[in-house]
Amino acid sequence: MRQDTSDALLVVRAQLGDRGSLGELVDRWHEPLWRYVHRLLGRPRATDDVSQEAWAAVLKALPRLREPERFAPWLFTIARRTVLDHLRDRYGRAEVEADETTFDAVPDEVSTVLDRREVDEGLAGLPPRERDVLVLFYLLDFPLADCAQVLQVPPGTAKSRLHRARRMLRENLVEKGYQS
């Protein structure tokens, strides 16, 4: 995996104080991180804020990252925790923002069968655990082991969540009248 090696080298250089390498890491991973957070939250304004919070946490913790080759799963683990903290805060208060759900990317294998709106509806109808594993596996192309690391569950649990999420997504879409 050339990408992992390149990320690992950038991480080590950034840990040694090379601002250019740090900037390259942020440039490379900003968009995927933003899309991930957006898929979990579904609200662009909140996505921007939470993404910035996640990057702040990443930059603060980067000097302590001991496995630079595992940067991507580590990054998305921090992003997921930041999203969960945001949701805890949001639902802990009485104030709830209007829902502005939009999903930008569609996995290639699904886009041939469903349009973007249909995928949005299907994903939005899933519980967060199932939606999270689908986004990591299909939209970010993480292997199951990395999904498990981000979700902080054993690989077998990630695999069963993915299986359940696929089934739930299919049932959800069929229930809404879409062809299977």
Image (spheres, rainbow, N blue to C red):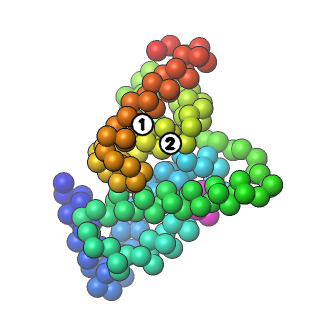
Tell me if residue 48 can be seen. Answer: no
Residue at the outermost right position? 94
> For the magenta stretch, what is the residue range?
47-51
| In this rendering, position of residue 22 left or right of residue 175 | left
Tell me if residue 36 can be seen. Answer: yes
CB atoms of marks 2 and 1 within 8 Å: yes
Residue at x 54% of width, y 62% of height:
82
Residue 50 sits inside the magenta stretch: yes
Say which of 136 and 1 sits in front. 136
On residue 161, the disc is 1
x and y percent of residue 145 in the render? Answer: 29, 48
x and y percent of residue 133 in the render? Answer: 43, 42
Question: Which callout, 2 or 1, points at the residue further toward the start of the chain?
Answer: 2
Q: CA distance from mark 2 to mark 1?
A: 8 Å
Q: Identify the amino acid type marked 2.
A: Arg
Residue at x 61% of width, y 46% of height:
42
x and y percent of residue 74 in the render? Answer: 37, 62
Residues packed near mark 2 inside 10 Å, few (<14), some (14 to 19) or many (20 plus): some
x and y percent of residue 109 in the render? Answer: 37, 28
Q: Which residue is mark 2?
A: 129
On residue 122, the disc is none
Q: Find residue 65 and report its image quarter.
A: bottom left
- Determine whether the residue tagged by mark 2 lies in a helix, strand or loop: helix
